[in-house]
Amino acid sequence: MAEYVLSRRAVLTVLRLLQTKEGDADKDSVYERTIRNVFFPRLQTSDDVSCGPQSAPVRELAHVWLIDERLVFHRPLGSDVPPSKLRGFLSDSSDPPDLVVFDPAFTVTDDPGHFGSATIVEFKRPGRNDYGPSPKGDPILQVVRHARAIRKSAIEGVDAAKKSIPHTARLYAYIIADVTDTSSERIAAYGFIPMPDQRGVLLAPRAYENHDRAYPMG
């Protein structure tokens, strides 16, 4: 247990140091990718990298707990990988989310009705302050775009049959970003409300229906 606690403390220390680093205007994308690698290695999937709470070597790569503890137990997972590259998932989209984590149920059953949820995560460079209403400048539009791509995708059954994603599937979206002047403007434009712990914001339940039944959180 002591090793487990110390390991997590070390991860948090590294993340805090990266967050306080002075960004280089010419290397902002590199800076953002470095932070993303703390959570899960880029361009990898959970089939490529062992992840989970089973053993100490595995725990070192299970840093999605920084977002939500429950994600550690979900498979498949892909980081900057098109959904079409994930096991058992059929998609025409070539636009990869920074991180996508699926409910593990659909990988162990042939019933698409067991597809309960998927989680989309978008990371933004600490201190970024140039958000706007354009498709590339609005992180909320970005996660909604990814949500729509998942809704249009399908699951490959054990018999290789194509099965549609059920309309009851829940999609969650996290945006990991600093609250700056321009991000605050986007938050206000969509009607987000503060979370109970005051450490983030959540799209009001009535509003999420307008965003392809995805629940964006920041």
Image (tube, rainbow, N blue to C red):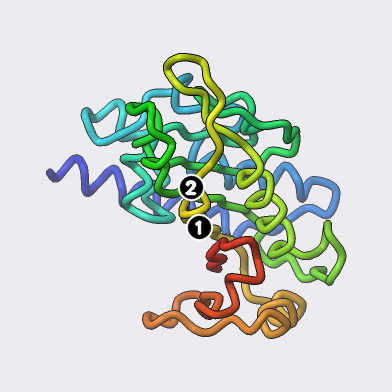
Where residue 27 is drawn, which disc sits there? none
Residue placed most toward the observer, 24 or 210: 210
* 156 shown above or below 147: above
Q: Which residue position holds label 2?
A: 118
154 or 127: nearer the viewer? 154
Residue wearing tag 1: 172
Residue 89's place in the image compared with 148, above or below, is above
Place of residue 24 in the rendered image (x, y in percent of width and height, measured from the top left):
78, 53
Comes first in the chain, label 1 or label 2: 2
Residue lying at 73% horizontally and 35% vertically, measured from the top left: 93
Distance CA(mark 1)–CA(mark 2): 6 Å
Picture quadrant where residue 78 is located? top right
Q: Where is residue 217 in the image (x, y as percent from the top left)?
A: 53, 67
Q: Position of residue 62 (x, y in %)?
A: 37, 38
Question: Is residue 144 rendered to the left or right of residue 167?
Answer: right
For the residue carrying disc 1, how many other residues have a C-alpha within 10 Å: few (<14), some (14-19), or many (20+)?
many
Q: Where is residue 115 in the image (x, y as percent from the top left)?
A: 42, 42
- The vertical placement of 191 against 13, above or below, is below
Tell me the kind of residue under disc 2. Ala
What is the secondary structure assignment of the residue under circle 2?
Answer: strand
Question: Which residue is painted at 40% across and 53% down in the image?
Answer: 66
User: Which quadrant of the rendered structure holds the C terminus?
Assistant: bottom right
Q: Is residue 109 left or right of residue 214?
A: left
Q: What residue type is labelled 1?
A: Tyr
> Crowding at label 2, few (<14), some or many (≥20) Cα neighbours within 10 Å?
many
**Could you tell me which residue is drawn at 57 percent across and 63 percent down?**
213
The residue at the point 25 percent across, 36 percent down is 53
Residue lying farthest to the top in this orientation: 159
Q: Quadrant of the N terminus?
A: top left
Q: Do the residues labelled 1 and 2 touch (CB within 8 Å)?
A: yes
